[in-house]
Amino acid sequence: MNDIAAALDLGAIAAHRHDRAAVVLELLQPGHTPLPGDKALSLAYAVAHHRLEGAENAARRGDTTTLDWYQNTAGSALACLVHSSRLGPRIVIAPTEDQMICGPHSDTPYYVLGRDTTRAAEPLAALTDDAFDHIAATGLDALVEAHAAVICLTGRRRPDQTLRSFAITRLPATVFTDHTDDAAVLGRDLVHEAAHNWLNDALVALRATIPDDKVYFSPWRGTERPAYGFLHACFAFPLTMIYAARTRPGTRARHAALTDHLRQQRAHLATAQVDFNRAVKLIPDPGLRERLDTVFQYARTL
């Protein structure tokens, strides 16, 4: 399996997403929410989990009004946020820091779509569209189309500042990321978090569990990490390298951040190679092992 697009084309993920979205929507609003087809399914899958998370939080607080909204009104209300893009329907938002919430399911504050959610300002929507153009030029658009349907821009940073991005398992197909005014850099970070969402979905779809009693040195964190986190890094960072290397002619030359990213990641992958060879064997599904190995080894050639 030498083709990156083929490595990322895992039919079990699509089947899982369809079935999971159907289960969640039936739980929220029995018999009332048909599933869309094609590219709209990615957004439906993401929004269903936001509704479920919001409903669960409301139920824990005893907030019956908000619970009713997530069950009966959220579907049509949140549809007003949808933005049409070349990657299909997206929701792009930019909540303020005080709108983010803290919970036991994430190490960092995160955001759940709700009654007060508004679209990101037009310049941010345009920045995201430009990032999609960069992604499409690298051939990684199918990855981002499926696994970054809700994009939460968490704050603007200067180019010299560290950018934070993350995804959480309870909100699949949702990406949280800081941004600069550089669409090519935003594209890289969308690829990175979409990769995490892809791997999470793949593990669930294949019922594959990575043992948590093994640790490996992570050059990205400078410390030992459990196999799960280590393998996630060994999948997501190589894909950002592929993105950076495939950017349109002239783009990388104009973007020192992408050039520096490739240089830094080459060194990290070289450091991680031996441990990756060991850790990937912990994945019980041979096809998934091959897919991760394909991505990692391809990036080593860049």
Image (cartoon, rainbow, N blue to C red):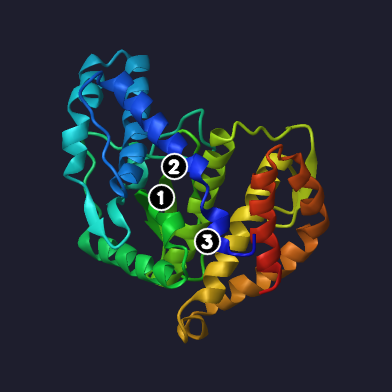
- What amino acid is labelled 2 in the image? Ala
Where's residue 97, x and y in %?
A: 37, 46
In primary-sequence order, the first of circles 3 and 2 is 3
Residue sitting at x 66%, y 67%: 299
Q: Picture quarter containing residue 33?
A: top left
Give the number of the mark in front: 2 or 1. Answer: 2
Q: In this view, does 146 lie to the left or right of 39?
A: right
Give the number of the mark in front: 1 or 3. Answer: 3
Q: Mark 2 highlights which residue? A: 14
Where's residue 289, x and y in %?
A: 69, 47
Q: In this view, does 37 lie to the left or right of 1?
A: left
Helix, strand or loop for disc 2: helix
Disc 3 versus disc 2: distance between alpha carbons? 15 Å
- What amino acid is labelled 3 in the image? Ala
Q: Mark 1 highlights which residue? A: 146
Where's residue 291, x and y in %?
A: 64, 53
Residue sitting at x 37%, y 15%: 60
Residue sitting at x 35%, y 45%: 42
Q: Nearer the viewer, residue 151 or 287?
A: 287
| Vertical position of residue 187 compared to residue 79: above or below | below
Q: Which of 295 and 69 is in front in this view?
A: 295
Q: Mark 3 highlights which residue? A: 5
In primary-sequence order, the first of circles 2 and 1 is 2
Helix, strand or loop for disc 3: helix
Disc 2 versus disc 1: distance between alpha carbons? 9 Å
For the C terminus, the image quarter is: bottom right
- What amino acid is labelled 1 in the image? Ala
Q: Nearer the viewer, residue 145 or 153?
A: 145
Residue sitting at x 41%, y 30%: 20
Q: Is residue 171 visible?
A: no
Q: Is residue 135 left or right of residue 28?
A: right
> Contact, CB < 8 Å: mark 3 with mark 2?
no
